[in-house]
Amino acid sequence: MNESNLIFGINGPVVTIKGKTTLSMLEMVYVGNQKLVGEVIALDCDKTTIQVYEDTAGLAPGEPVYGTGNQLCAELGPGILMNIFDGIERPLLALQAQSGAFISKGLNTSALDEEKQWDVRLLVKEGDTLCGGEVYAETQETPAICHKIMLSPRLSGKIVSVQSDGLYRLRDTVAVLEDKAGERHELTLCQRWPIRLPRPVGKRLPASHPLVTGQRILDTLFPVAKGGAAAIPGGFGTGKTMTQHQLAKWCDADIIVYVGCGERGNEMTQALQEFSELIDPRTGKSLMERTVLIANTSNMPVAAREASIYTGITLAEYYRDMGYHTAIMADSTSRWAEALREISGRLEEMPADEGFPAYLPSRLSEFYERAGYMEVLSHGEGSVTIIGAVSPQGSDFSEPVTQNTKRFTRCFWALDKSLAYARHYPAINWTNSYSEYLGDLEQWYHDNVGADFMQCREEISSILYEESSLMEIVKLIGADVLPDDQKLTIEIARLIRVGFLQQNAFHPDDTYVPPEKQLKMMRVILHLYHKCQQIVALQVPIGRLLETGLFDKLTKMKYDVPNNRLELLDDYVTEIDNALGSYLRK
Protein backbone atom coordinates (compact mmCIF):
# COMPACT_ATOMS: atom_id res chain seq x y z
CA MET A 1 0.00 0.00 0.00
CA ASN A 2 1.24 3.51 -0.84
CA GLU A 3 1.96 5.44 2.36
CA SER A 4 0.04 8.45 1.04
CA ASN A 5 -3.18 6.42 0.65
CA LEU A 6 -4.64 7.63 3.94
CA ILE A 7 -8.12 9.06 4.48
CA PHE A 8 -8.10 12.84 4.79
CA GLY A 9 -11.82 13.70 4.82
CA ILE A 10 -15.19 11.91 5.05
CA ASN A 11 -18.52 13.34 3.87
CA GLY A 12 -21.18 10.62 4.00
CA PRO A 13 -20.31 8.07 1.28
CA VAL A 14 -17.62 10.39 -0.16
CA VAL A 15 -14.06 9.92 1.09
CA THR A 16 -11.06 12.03 0.07
CA ILE A 17 -7.33 11.38 0.11
CA LYS A 18 -4.89 14.32 0.25
CA GLY A 19 -1.79 14.40 -1.89
CA LYS A 20 -0.61 12.35 -4.85
CA THR A 21 -1.59 8.67 -4.93
CA THR A 22 -1.01 5.65 -7.17
CA LEU A 23 -4.76 5.09 -7.62
CA SER A 24 -6.41 5.42 -11.05
CA MET A 25 -9.81 6.60 -12.22
CA LEU A 26 -12.67 4.13 -11.56
CA GLU A 27 -10.33 1.81 -9.66
CA MET A 28 -11.98 -0.36 -7.05
CA VAL A 29 -10.51 0.20 -3.59
CA TYR A 30 -10.93 -1.03 -0.03
CA VAL A 31 -11.44 1.83 2.42
CA GLY A 32 -10.43 1.88 6.09
CA ASN A 33 -9.47 -0.88 8.49
CA GLN A 34 -12.77 -2.64 7.80
CA LYS A 35 -11.99 -2.69 4.05
CA LEU A 36 -15.24 -1.15 2.83
CA VAL A 37 -15.74 -1.44 -0.92
CA GLY A 38 -15.29 1.85 -2.81
CA GLU A 39 -14.49 3.30 -6.22
CA VAL A 40 -12.35 6.23 -7.34
CA ILE A 41 -14.61 8.84 -8.98
CA ALA A 42 -12.34 11.91 -9.21
CA LEU A 43 -8.60 12.55 -9.39
CA ASP A 44 -6.69 15.81 -8.95
CA CYS A 45 -2.96 16.37 -8.61
CA ASP A 46 -3.40 16.85 -4.88
CA LYS A 47 -6.67 15.06 -4.06
CA THR A 48 -8.40 11.74 -4.80
CA THR A 49 -12.14 11.31 -4.30
CA ILE A 50 -13.74 7.92 -3.59
CA GLN A 51 -17.37 6.90 -3.28
CA VAL A 52 -17.92 4.11 -0.75
CA TYR A 53 -20.58 1.47 -1.35
CA GLU A 54 -21.09 0.71 2.34
CA ASP A 55 -22.02 2.68 5.45
CA THR A 56 -19.10 4.91 6.47
CA ALA A 57 -20.19 5.36 10.11
CA GLY A 58 -17.17 4.84 12.36
CA LEU A 59 -14.66 5.52 9.58
CA ALA A 60 -11.95 7.97 10.69
CA PRO A 61 -9.28 10.12 9.01
CA GLY A 62 -5.88 8.49 8.87
CA GLU A 63 -7.20 5.01 8.09
CA PRO A 64 -5.65 3.36 5.03
CA VAL A 65 -7.11 2.95 1.54
CA TYR A 66 -6.04 -0.16 -0.38
CA GLY A 67 -5.96 -0.12 -4.17
CA THR A 68 -6.81 -3.25 -6.15
CA GLY A 69 -5.57 -2.22 -9.58
CA ASN A 70 -8.92 -3.28 -11.10
CA GLN A 71 -12.20 -1.59 -11.89
CA LEU A 72 -15.42 -2.50 -10.05
CA CYS A 73 -16.35 -5.75 -11.79
CA ALA A 74 -19.18 -8.23 -11.84
CA GLU A 75 -18.42 -11.91 -11.32
CA LEU A 76 -19.90 -13.79 -14.28
CA GLY A 77 -20.44 -17.53 -14.30
CA PRO A 78 -22.91 -20.31 -13.42
CA GLY A 79 -24.83 -19.61 -10.22
CA ILE A 80 -26.09 -16.14 -11.08
CA LEU A 81 -29.65 -17.32 -11.69
CA MET A 82 -31.89 -18.03 -8.67
CA ASN A 83 -29.68 -15.66 -6.65
CA ILE A 84 -30.35 -12.37 -4.86
CA PHE A 85 -27.56 -9.77 -4.90
CA ASP A 86 -27.10 -6.29 -3.50
CA GLY A 87 -26.08 -3.34 -5.70
CA ILE A 88 -22.43 -4.45 -6.02
CA GLU A 89 -23.23 -8.14 -6.58
CA ARG A 90 -22.72 -9.41 -3.06
CA PRO A 91 -25.02 -12.43 -2.46
CA LEU A 92 -27.49 -11.38 0.22
CA LEU A 93 -28.33 -14.90 1.38
CA ALA A 94 -24.62 -15.67 1.94
CA LEU A 95 -24.16 -12.36 3.78
CA GLN A 96 -27.21 -13.10 5.91
CA ALA A 97 -25.71 -16.44 6.91
CA GLN A 98 -22.59 -14.60 8.10
CA SER A 99 -24.14 -11.63 9.88
CA GLY A 100 -27.86 -12.22 10.42
CA ALA A 101 -30.76 -10.04 9.29
CA PHE A 102 -28.69 -6.84 9.29
CA ILE A 103 -25.57 -6.99 7.12
CA SER A 104 -22.34 -6.07 8.87
CA LYS A 105 -19.88 -3.67 7.29
CA GLY A 106 -16.79 -4.90 5.53
CA LEU A 107 -18.16 -8.35 4.71
CA ASN A 108 -16.67 -9.58 1.47
CA THR A 109 -17.67 -12.88 -0.01
CA SER A 110 -17.55 -14.29 -3.50
CA ALA A 111 -20.55 -13.34 -5.61
CA LEU A 112 -20.92 -16.97 -6.75
CA ASP A 113 -20.66 -20.23 -4.83
CA GLU A 114 -17.06 -21.38 -5.33
CA GLU A 115 -17.57 -24.83 -3.77
CA LYS A 116 -20.57 -25.98 -5.79
CA GLN A 117 -19.71 -28.50 -8.49
CA TRP A 118 -21.13 -28.13 -11.98
CA ASP A 119 -21.56 -30.90 -14.55
CA VAL A 120 -19.52 -29.39 -17.40
CA ARG A 121 -19.38 -30.50 -21.03
CA LEU A 122 -16.31 -29.23 -22.93
CA LEU A 123 -16.96 -28.09 -26.50
CA VAL A 124 -13.34 -27.60 -27.65
CA LYS A 125 -10.32 -29.83 -28.26
CA GLU A 126 -6.58 -29.28 -28.39
CA GLY A 127 -5.51 -27.18 -31.37
CA ASP A 128 -8.81 -25.29 -31.69
CA THR A 129 -8.53 -21.55 -32.24
CA LEU A 130 -10.88 -19.38 -30.18
CA CYS A 131 -11.77 -15.72 -30.55
CA GLY A 132 -13.12 -13.52 -27.79
CA GLY A 133 -16.70 -14.34 -26.77
CA GLU A 134 -16.76 -17.86 -28.25
CA VAL A 135 -18.17 -20.74 -26.19
CA TYR A 136 -15.78 -23.41 -24.94
CA ALA A 137 -17.96 -25.27 -22.41
CA GLU A 138 -21.51 -25.47 -21.13
CA THR A 139 -23.39 -26.61 -18.04
CA GLN A 140 -27.04 -26.84 -17.07
CA GLU A 141 -27.31 -23.91 -14.65
CA THR A 142 -31.01 -24.49 -13.94
CA PRO A 143 -33.53 -26.88 -15.48
CA ALA A 144 -34.66 -24.00 -17.71
CA ILE A 145 -31.32 -22.47 -18.76
CA CYS A 146 -28.14 -23.95 -20.24
CA HIS A 147 -25.19 -21.79 -19.20
CA LYS A 148 -22.67 -21.28 -22.02
CA ILE A 149 -19.18 -20.60 -20.71
CA MET A 150 -17.52 -18.07 -22.98
CA LEU A 151 -14.00 -16.86 -23.52
CA SER A 152 -13.45 -13.34 -22.25
CA PRO A 153 -13.88 -10.82 -25.11
CA ARG A 154 -10.37 -9.60 -24.32
CA LEU A 155 -8.73 -12.97 -25.07
CA SER A 156 -8.08 -15.03 -28.19
CA GLY A 157 -5.67 -17.79 -29.10
CA LYS A 158 -5.22 -21.57 -29.43
CA ILE A 159 -6.31 -24.27 -27.00
CA VAL A 160 -3.21 -26.15 -25.85
CA SER A 161 -4.82 -28.45 -23.31
CA VAL A 162 -8.35 -29.37 -22.32
CA GLN A 163 -9.89 -31.46 -19.54
CA SER A 164 -12.49 -34.16 -20.00
CA ASP A 165 -16.19 -33.69 -19.25
CA GLY A 166 -17.12 -33.94 -15.58
CA LEU A 167 -17.77 -32.10 -12.34
CA TYR A 168 -15.86 -28.86 -11.77
CA ARG A 169 -15.93 -26.01 -9.29
CA LEU A 170 -16.15 -22.39 -10.39
CA ARG A 171 -12.41 -21.68 -10.37
CA ASP A 172 -11.17 -25.08 -11.55
CA THR A 173 -9.15 -25.00 -14.78
CA VAL A 174 -11.00 -26.78 -17.61
CA ALA A 175 -8.70 -25.71 -20.48
CA VAL A 176 -5.55 -23.72 -21.20
CA LEU A 177 -5.35 -21.13 -23.98
CA GLU A 178 -2.15 -19.73 -25.51
CA ASP A 179 -2.42 -16.24 -27.02
CA LYS A 180 -0.41 -14.83 -29.94
CA ALA A 181 2.27 -13.54 -27.56
CA GLY A 182 2.85 -17.06 -26.25
CA GLU A 183 1.32 -16.34 -22.84
CA ARG A 184 -0.86 -19.07 -21.40
CA HIS A 185 -4.23 -18.42 -19.75
CA GLU A 186 -6.08 -20.92 -17.57
CA LEU A 187 -9.76 -21.02 -18.51
CA THR A 188 -12.21 -21.57 -15.65
CA LEU A 189 -16.00 -21.46 -15.42
CA CYS A 190 -16.13 -17.74 -14.62
CA GLN A 191 -14.84 -14.36 -15.73
CA ARG A 192 -14.98 -10.77 -14.48
CA TRP A 193 -16.18 -7.70 -16.37
CA PRO A 194 -16.25 -3.97 -15.40
CA ILE A 195 -19.86 -3.00 -14.74
CA ARG A 196 -19.55 0.46 -16.32
CA LEU A 197 -18.14 -0.87 -19.59
CA PRO A 198 -20.59 -2.32 -22.17
CA ARG A 199 -19.66 -5.82 -23.29
CA PRO A 200 -18.55 -5.91 -26.95
CA VAL A 201 -20.78 -7.39 -29.67
CA GLY A 202 -20.49 -8.27 -33.36
CA LYS A 203 -22.97 -5.71 -34.65
CA ARG A 204 -26.29 -4.12 -33.79
CA LEU A 205 -29.31 -5.56 -35.62
CA PRO A 206 -32.66 -3.90 -36.40
CA ALA A 207 -35.24 -4.16 -33.63
CA SER A 208 -37.85 -6.02 -35.69
CA HIS A 209 -39.28 -8.51 -33.14
CA PRO A 210 -41.70 -7.40 -30.41
CA LEU A 211 -41.31 -8.34 -26.78
CA VAL A 212 -44.63 -10.17 -26.46
CA THR A 213 -46.01 -9.48 -22.99
CA GLY A 214 -49.57 -10.83 -23.18
CA GLN A 215 -50.83 -7.45 -21.95
CA ARG A 216 -53.29 -6.13 -24.53
CA ILE A 217 -52.67 -2.42 -24.09
CA LEU A 218 -48.92 -2.98 -24.53
CA ASP A 219 -48.81 -5.58 -27.32
CA THR A 220 -51.54 -3.88 -29.35
CA LEU A 221 -51.26 -0.15 -28.75
CA PHE A 222 -47.75 0.48 -27.40
CA PRO A 223 -45.43 -2.46 -28.19
CA VAL A 224 -41.76 -2.50 -27.28
CA ALA A 225 -39.24 -4.32 -29.46
CA LYS A 226 -36.79 -6.91 -28.21
CA GLY A 227 -33.65 -4.91 -27.74
CA GLY A 228 -35.67 -1.75 -27.16
CA ALA A 229 -36.10 0.52 -24.17
CA ALA A 230 -39.34 1.50 -22.47
CA ALA A 231 -40.15 3.82 -19.58
CA ILE A 232 -42.99 3.36 -17.07
CA PRO A 233 -43.51 6.69 -15.30
CA GLY A 234 -46.13 7.01 -12.61
CA GLY A 235 -46.79 8.42 -9.18
CA PHE A 236 -47.17 6.50 -5.94
CA GLY A 237 -49.75 3.72 -6.10
CA THR A 238 -50.23 3.69 -9.88
CA GLY A 239 -48.86 0.16 -10.31
CA LYS A 240 -45.29 0.50 -11.64
CA THR A 241 -43.94 -2.40 -9.63
CA MET A 242 -46.92 -4.68 -10.30
CA THR A 243 -46.75 -3.91 -14.03
CA GLN A 244 -43.09 -4.92 -14.04
CA HIS A 245 -43.91 -8.09 -12.11
CA GLN A 246 -46.53 -8.97 -14.72
CA LEU A 247 -44.05 -8.32 -17.52
CA ALA A 248 -41.36 -10.39 -15.79
CA LYS A 249 -43.70 -13.36 -15.51
CA TRP A 250 -45.30 -13.30 -18.95
CA CYS A 251 -42.97 -11.60 -21.45
CA ASP A 252 -41.20 -13.90 -23.89
CA ALA A 253 -37.68 -13.01 -22.71
CA ASP A 254 -35.46 -15.96 -21.77
CA ILE A 255 -33.79 -14.27 -18.77
CA ILE A 256 -35.26 -11.73 -16.33
CA VAL A 257 -33.05 -9.34 -14.34
CA TYR A 258 -35.04 -7.39 -11.74
CA VAL A 259 -33.29 -4.44 -10.08
CA GLY A 260 -35.01 -2.98 -7.02
CA CYS A 261 -33.15 0.33 -6.89
CA GLY A 262 -33.87 2.39 -3.80
CA GLU A 263 -37.33 0.91 -3.21
CA ARG A 264 -38.96 0.67 0.22
CA GLY A 265 -37.80 -2.28 2.30
CA ASN A 266 -41.27 -3.78 2.82
CA GLU A 267 -42.07 -3.49 -0.89
CA MET A 268 -38.76 -5.11 -1.82
CA THR A 269 -39.39 -7.93 0.66
CA GLN A 270 -42.83 -8.52 -0.88
CA ALA A 271 -41.28 -8.55 -4.35
CA LEU A 272 -38.65 -11.12 -3.35
CA GLN A 273 -41.30 -13.35 -1.77
CA GLU A 274 -43.63 -13.08 -4.77
CA PHE A 275 -40.89 -13.84 -7.29
CA SER A 276 -39.94 -16.99 -5.39
CA GLU A 277 -43.59 -18.13 -5.47
CA LEU A 278 -44.32 -17.32 -9.13
CA ILE A 279 -44.75 -20.27 -11.46
CA ASP A 280 -43.03 -20.00 -14.83
CA PRO A 281 -45.73 -20.49 -17.52
CA ARG A 282 -43.06 -21.96 -19.82
CA THR A 283 -41.90 -24.78 -17.58
CA GLY A 284 -44.48 -25.04 -14.80
CA LYS A 285 -41.64 -24.64 -12.29
CA SER A 286 -40.37 -21.66 -10.31
CA LEU A 287 -39.83 -18.45 -12.29
CA MET A 288 -36.63 -17.95 -10.30
CA GLU A 289 -34.97 -20.63 -12.47
CA ARG A 290 -34.45 -17.94 -15.12
CA THR A 291 -34.45 -14.85 -12.91
CA VAL A 292 -31.82 -12.91 -10.98
CA LEU A 293 -32.80 -10.28 -8.40
CA ILE A 294 -30.77 -7.26 -7.32
CA ALA A 295 -32.14 -5.78 -4.11
CA ASN A 296 -31.01 -2.33 -3.05
CA THR A 297 -33.49 -0.81 -0.61
CA SER A 298 -33.81 2.87 0.24
CA ASN A 299 -31.96 2.48 3.56
CA MET A 300 -28.93 0.83 1.95
CA PRO A 301 -25.86 2.99 1.19
CA VAL A 302 -26.74 5.52 -1.50
CA ALA A 303 -23.62 4.91 -3.59
CA ALA A 304 -24.48 1.22 -4.00
CA ARG A 305 -27.85 2.32 -5.36
CA GLU A 306 -26.00 4.22 -8.08
CA ALA A 307 -24.01 1.09 -9.00
CA SER A 308 -26.94 -1.34 -8.91
CA ILE A 309 -28.36 -0.67 -12.38
CA TYR A 310 -24.88 -1.05 -13.92
CA THR A 311 -24.52 -4.40 -12.17
CA GLY A 312 -27.93 -5.44 -13.48
CA ILE A 313 -27.27 -4.43 -17.09
CA THR A 314 -23.88 -6.22 -17.04
CA LEU A 315 -25.56 -9.47 -15.94
CA ALA A 316 -28.17 -9.00 -18.68
CA GLU A 317 -25.46 -8.45 -21.31
CA TYR A 318 -23.63 -11.58 -20.15
CA TYR A 319 -26.66 -13.78 -20.84
CA ARG A 320 -27.31 -11.88 -24.07
CA ASP A 321 -23.84 -12.90 -25.21
CA MET A 322 -24.89 -16.54 -24.78
CA GLY A 323 -27.62 -15.95 -27.36
CA TYR A 324 -30.49 -15.39 -24.91
CA HIS A 325 -33.09 -12.63 -25.00
CA THR A 326 -32.91 -10.83 -21.66
CA ALA A 327 -35.19 -8.23 -20.09
CA ILE A 328 -34.03 -5.97 -17.27
CA MET A 329 -36.61 -4.30 -15.03
CA ALA A 330 -35.16 -1.25 -13.26
CA ASP A 331 -37.41 -0.08 -10.42
CA SER A 332 -36.88 2.78 -10.20
CA THR A 333 -34.47 5.01 -12.08
CA SER A 334 -35.76 8.02 -10.13
CA ARG A 335 -34.23 6.63 -6.93
CA TRP A 336 -31.02 6.04 -8.87
CA ALA A 337 -31.07 9.66 -10.05
CA GLU A 338 -31.61 10.80 -6.46
CA ALA A 339 -28.45 8.90 -5.51
CA LEU A 340 -26.58 10.78 -8.24
CA ARG A 341 -27.97 14.05 -6.86
CA GLU A 342 -26.91 13.27 -3.29
CA ILE A 343 -23.36 12.29 -4.26
CA SER A 344 -23.11 15.30 -6.58
CA GLY A 345 -24.15 17.58 -3.73
CA ARG A 346 -21.50 16.15 -1.44
CA LEU A 347 -18.93 16.71 -4.19
CA GLU A 348 -20.08 20.36 -4.33
CA GLU A 349 -20.77 20.16 -8.06
CA MET A 350 -22.85 22.85 -9.77
CA PRO A 351 -26.49 21.66 -9.72
CA ALA A 352 -28.85 21.76 -12.73
CA ASP A 353 -32.66 21.38 -12.80
CA GLU A 354 -34.14 20.53 -9.37
CA GLY A 355 -30.65 19.95 -7.97
CA PHE A 356 -29.82 17.02 -10.25
CA PRO A 357 -26.28 17.04 -11.66
CA ALA A 358 -25.73 18.45 -15.15
CA TYR A 359 -24.55 15.01 -16.32
CA LEU A 360 -27.90 13.30 -15.52
CA PRO A 361 -28.86 13.04 -19.24
CA SER A 362 -25.52 11.46 -20.18
CA ARG A 363 -25.75 8.92 -17.34
CA LEU A 364 -29.29 7.99 -18.40
CA SER A 365 -28.17 7.61 -22.01
CA GLU A 366 -25.23 5.40 -20.94
CA PHE A 367 -27.73 3.05 -19.30
CA TYR A 368 -30.51 2.96 -21.92
CA GLU A 369 -28.09 2.77 -24.86
CA ARG A 370 -26.88 -0.61 -23.57
CA ALA A 371 -30.18 -2.06 -24.78
CA GLY A 372 -30.16 -3.59 -28.24
CA TYR A 373 -30.76 -6.57 -30.49
CA MET A 374 -27.26 -7.81 -31.28
CA GLU A 375 -25.24 -10.28 -33.27
CA VAL A 376 -23.03 -11.55 -30.45
CA LEU A 377 -19.40 -12.60 -30.64
CA SER A 378 -20.38 -16.30 -30.50
CA HIS A 379 -22.16 -15.71 -33.85
CA GLY A 380 -25.68 -16.08 -32.48
CA GLU A 381 -28.27 -13.41 -31.77
CA GLY A 382 -29.33 -12.02 -28.41
CA SER A 383 -30.98 -8.95 -27.00
CA VAL A 384 -31.25 -6.78 -23.91
CA THR A 385 -34.58 -5.02 -23.41
CA ILE A 386 -34.67 -2.32 -20.72
CA ILE A 387 -37.91 -1.44 -18.95
CA GLY A 388 -37.25 1.38 -16.51
CA ALA A 389 -39.77 2.63 -13.97
CA VAL A 390 -39.74 6.35 -13.18
CA SER A 391 -41.27 7.77 -9.99
CA PRO A 392 -41.89 11.49 -10.57
CA GLN A 393 -42.86 13.32 -7.41
CA GLY A 394 -46.54 14.25 -7.46
CA SER A 395 -46.97 12.47 -10.83
CA ASP A 396 -45.32 15.47 -12.48
CA PHE A 397 -44.05 14.18 -15.84
CA SER A 398 -42.31 17.49 -16.53
CA GLU A 399 -39.61 16.82 -13.91
CA PRO A 400 -36.04 16.23 -15.16
CA VAL A 401 -35.76 12.43 -14.79
CA THR A 402 -38.96 11.73 -16.75
CA GLN A 403 -38.18 14.27 -19.44
CA ASN A 404 -34.62 13.06 -19.94
CA THR A 405 -35.74 9.43 -19.93
CA LYS A 406 -38.14 10.21 -22.79
CA ARG A 407 -35.13 11.35 -24.84
CA PHE A 408 -33.49 7.92 -24.69
CA THR A 409 -36.47 5.55 -24.81
CA ARG A 410 -38.76 4.99 -27.78
CA CYS A 411 -41.63 3.58 -25.74
CA PHE A 412 -43.47 5.52 -23.03
CA TRP A 413 -46.11 3.83 -20.85
CA ALA A 414 -47.59 6.67 -18.80
CA LEU A 415 -49.38 5.43 -15.68
CA ASP A 416 -52.42 7.44 -14.62
CA LYS A 417 -53.41 8.00 -11.00
CA SER A 418 -57.11 8.42 -11.83
CA LEU A 419 -57.17 5.09 -13.70
CA ALA A 420 -55.44 3.34 -10.80
CA TYR A 421 -57.92 4.80 -8.28
CA ALA A 422 -60.77 3.62 -10.55
CA ARG A 423 -59.27 0.08 -10.40
CA HIS A 424 -58.50 0.13 -14.12
CA TYR A 425 -55.34 -1.98 -14.50
CA PRO A 426 -52.89 -1.75 -16.13
CA ALA A 427 -53.39 1.95 -15.36
CA ILE A 428 -51.65 3.05 -18.57
CA ASN A 429 -53.09 6.23 -20.06
CA TRP A 430 -53.70 5.59 -23.75
CA THR A 431 -53.62 9.29 -24.69
CA ASN A 432 -50.30 10.15 -23.00
CA SER A 433 -48.46 6.94 -23.92
CA TYR A 434 -46.73 6.21 -27.21
CA SER A 435 -44.46 3.72 -28.98
CA GLU A 436 -42.07 4.56 -31.80
CA TYR A 437 -41.50 0.87 -32.59
CA LEU A 438 -44.75 0.40 -34.54
CA GLY A 439 -43.13 0.91 -37.94
CA ASP A 440 -40.28 -1.48 -37.09
CA LEU A 441 -42.68 -4.20 -35.90
CA GLU A 442 -45.36 -3.88 -38.58
CA GLN A 443 -43.90 -6.66 -40.77
CA TRP A 444 -43.64 -9.06 -37.82
CA TYR A 445 -47.30 -8.57 -36.90
CA HIS A 446 -48.27 -8.96 -40.55
CA ASP A 447 -46.38 -12.26 -40.91
CA ASN A 448 -46.99 -13.80 -37.48
CA VAL A 449 -50.36 -12.53 -36.23
CA GLY A 450 -52.51 -11.24 -39.07
CA ALA A 451 -52.33 -9.03 -42.14
CA ASP A 452 -54.93 -6.67 -40.66
CA PHE A 453 -53.39 -6.36 -37.17
CA MET A 454 -51.94 -2.88 -37.64
CA GLN A 455 -55.08 -1.67 -39.42
CA CYS A 456 -57.27 -2.84 -36.51
CA ARG A 457 -54.83 -1.32 -34.05
CA GLU A 458 -54.96 2.05 -35.82
CA GLU A 459 -58.76 2.08 -35.82
CA ILE A 460 -58.95 1.15 -32.12
CA SER A 461 -56.48 3.92 -31.31
CA SER A 462 -58.43 6.41 -33.43
CA ILE A 463 -61.69 5.63 -31.59
CA LEU A 464 -60.01 6.17 -28.22
CA TYR A 465 -58.51 9.46 -29.39
CA GLU A 466 -61.88 10.64 -30.72
CA GLU A 467 -63.54 9.71 -27.43
CA SER A 468 -61.08 11.86 -25.46
CA SER A 469 -62.04 14.85 -27.64
CA LEU A 470 -65.76 14.15 -27.25
CA MET A 471 -65.48 13.84 -23.48
CA GLU A 472 -64.24 17.44 -23.32
CA ILE A 473 -67.50 18.49 -24.98
CA VAL A 474 -69.54 16.21 -22.68
CA LYS A 475 -67.99 17.85 -19.61
CA LEU A 476 -69.21 21.23 -20.84
CA ILE A 477 -72.69 20.57 -22.24
CA GLY A 478 -73.55 16.96 -21.37
CA ALA A 479 -73.90 13.83 -23.49
CA ASP A 480 -77.58 14.26 -24.41
CA VAL A 481 -76.92 16.91 -27.05
CA LEU A 482 -74.48 14.74 -29.00
CA PRO A 483 -75.70 13.15 -32.24
CA ASP A 484 -76.10 9.37 -32.25
CA ASP A 485 -72.96 8.70 -34.29
CA GLN A 486 -70.86 10.44 -31.63
CA LYS A 487 -72.74 8.64 -28.86
CA LEU A 488 -71.87 5.40 -30.65
CA THR A 489 -68.17 6.37 -30.61
CA ILE A 490 -68.35 6.92 -26.85
CA GLU A 491 -70.08 3.56 -26.29
CA ILE A 492 -67.58 1.66 -28.46
CA ALA A 493 -64.70 3.44 -26.71
CA ARG A 494 -66.13 2.36 -23.35
CA LEU A 495 -66.28 -1.21 -24.66
CA ILE A 496 -62.64 -0.96 -25.75
CA ARG A 497 -61.56 0.48 -22.41
CA VAL A 498 -63.40 -2.00 -20.20
CA GLY A 499 -63.51 -5.06 -22.43
CA PHE A 500 -60.09 -4.80 -24.09
CA LEU A 501 -57.63 -2.47 -22.35
CA GLN A 502 -58.58 -3.40 -18.79
CA GLN A 503 -57.04 -6.72 -17.80
CA ASN A 504 -57.42 -8.99 -14.77
CA ALA A 505 -54.12 -10.40 -13.56
CA PHE A 506 -55.92 -12.94 -11.36
CA HIS A 507 -58.07 -14.50 -14.10
CA PRO A 508 -56.45 -17.57 -15.72
CA ASP A 509 -57.48 -16.58 -19.26
CA ASP A 510 -57.03 -12.83 -18.89
CA THR A 511 -53.69 -12.53 -17.10
CA TYR A 512 -51.92 -13.42 -20.36
CA VAL A 513 -53.52 -13.00 -23.80
CA PRO A 514 -51.71 -14.22 -26.93
CA PRO A 515 -51.51 -11.76 -29.87
CA GLU A 516 -53.83 -13.99 -31.95
CA LYS A 517 -56.62 -13.57 -29.39
CA GLN A 518 -55.94 -9.84 -29.18
CA LEU A 519 -56.46 -9.53 -32.95
CA LYS A 520 -59.67 -11.57 -32.92
CA MET A 521 -61.05 -9.47 -30.04
CA MET A 522 -60.31 -6.29 -32.01
CA ARG A 523 -62.03 -7.74 -35.07
CA VAL A 524 -65.18 -8.53 -33.05
CA ILE A 525 -65.30 -5.05 -31.49
CA LEU A 526 -64.75 -3.31 -34.82
CA HIS A 527 -67.34 -5.55 -36.54
CA LEU A 528 -69.92 -4.38 -34.00
CA TYR A 529 -68.81 -0.77 -34.53
CA HIS A 530 -69.14 -0.93 -38.31
CA LYS A 531 -72.58 -2.62 -38.15
CA CYS A 532 -73.81 -0.04 -35.65
CA GLN A 533 -72.49 2.79 -37.84
CA GLN A 534 -74.63 1.53 -40.74
CA ILE A 535 -77.70 1.28 -38.51
CA VAL A 536 -77.23 4.71 -36.91
CA ALA A 537 -76.95 6.18 -40.42
CA LEU A 538 -80.50 4.85 -41.00
CA GLN A 539 -81.70 7.07 -38.12
CA VAL A 540 -82.09 4.18 -35.62
CA PRO A 541 -81.62 5.53 -32.06
CA ILE A 542 -78.48 4.38 -30.27
CA GLY A 543 -80.64 3.29 -27.34
CA ARG A 544 -82.19 0.53 -29.46
CA LEU A 545 -78.75 -0.88 -30.19
CA LEU A 546 -77.75 -0.82 -26.52
CA GLU A 547 -80.91 -2.77 -25.64
CA THR A 548 -79.63 -5.76 -27.66
CA GLY A 549 -77.11 -6.49 -24.87
CA LEU A 550 -74.29 -6.93 -27.37
CA PHE A 551 -72.14 -4.21 -25.82
CA ASP A 552 -72.30 -5.80 -22.35
CA LYS A 553 -71.69 -9.29 -23.76
CA LEU A 554 -68.60 -8.19 -25.67
CA THR A 555 -67.25 -6.57 -22.52
CA LYS A 556 -67.09 -10.04 -20.94
CA MET A 557 -65.71 -11.99 -23.90
CA LYS A 558 -62.18 -11.72 -22.50
CA TYR A 559 -63.33 -14.00 -19.66
CA ASP A 560 -65.75 -16.19 -21.61
CA VAL A 561 -63.35 -17.29 -24.38
CA PRO A 562 -60.43 -19.47 -23.23
CA ASN A 563 -57.05 -18.81 -24.83
CA ASN A 564 -57.11 -22.29 -26.39
CA ARG A 565 -60.61 -21.90 -27.90
CA LEU A 566 -60.20 -18.84 -30.10
CA GLU A 567 -62.72 -20.17 -32.63
CA LEU A 568 -65.44 -19.22 -30.13
CA LEU A 569 -64.79 -15.56 -30.98
CA ASP A 570 -66.19 -16.22 -34.46
CA ASP A 571 -69.55 -17.01 -32.83
CA TYR A 572 -69.69 -13.39 -31.59
CA VAL A 573 -69.53 -12.15 -35.20
CA THR A 574 -72.42 -14.42 -36.13
CA GLU A 575 -74.42 -13.26 -33.10
CA ILE A 576 -73.84 -9.60 -34.02
CA ASP A 577 -75.03 -10.22 -37.57
CA ASN A 578 -78.15 -12.04 -36.34
CA ALA A 579 -79.04 -9.43 -33.71
CA LEU A 580 -78.54 -6.40 -35.95
CA GLY A 581 -79.53 -7.86 -39.30
CA SER A 582 -83.20 -6.96 -38.86
CA TYR A 583 -82.37 -3.24 -38.63
CA LEU A 584 -80.43 -3.34 -41.89
CA ARG A 585 -83.17 -5.23 -43.75
CA LYS A 586 -85.85 -2.63 -42.98
Image (spheres, grey):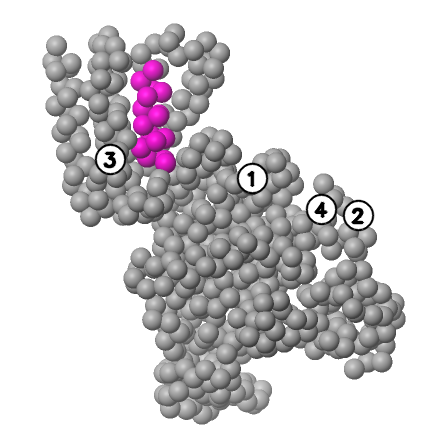
- Helix, strand, or loop for circle 2? loop
Q: CA distance from mark 2 to mark 4?
A: 9 Å
Mark 1, other Cα within 10 Å: few <14 / some 14–19 / many ≥20: some
- Helix, strand, or loop for circle 3? helix
Q: Earlier in the sequence, mark 1 or mark 2?
A: 1
Tell me the quadrant of the picture where the C terminus can be found: top left
Question: Is 436 drawn above or below residue 276 in the view shown?
Answer: above
Mark 2 vs mark 3: give the one in front: 3
Q: CA distance from mark 2 to mark 3?
A: 57 Å
Q: As drawn, is 442 to the left or to the right of 401?
A: left
Q: CA distance from mark 1 to mark 4?
A: 19 Å
Mark 3, other Cα within 10 Å: few <14 / some 14–19 / many ≥20: some
* Residue at x 19% of width, y 42% of height: 566
Q: Is residue 471 visible?
A: yes
Q: Which mark is residue 350?
A: 2
Residue named by callout 4: 356
Q: As drawn, is 157 to the left or to the right of 455?
A: right
Amino acid at the residue labelled 2:
Met
Q: Which mark is residue 235?
A: 1
Q: What range of the chain is rendered magenta?
A: 487-502
Q: Earlier in the sequence, mark 2 or mark 4?
A: 2
**Residue 554 spot, x, y in % from top left:** 25, 30
**Residue 543 spot, x, y in % from top left:** 26, 13
* Residue at x 82% of width, y 64% of height: 10
- Helix, strand, or loop for circle 4? loop
* Marks 4,3: beta carbons within 8 A: no
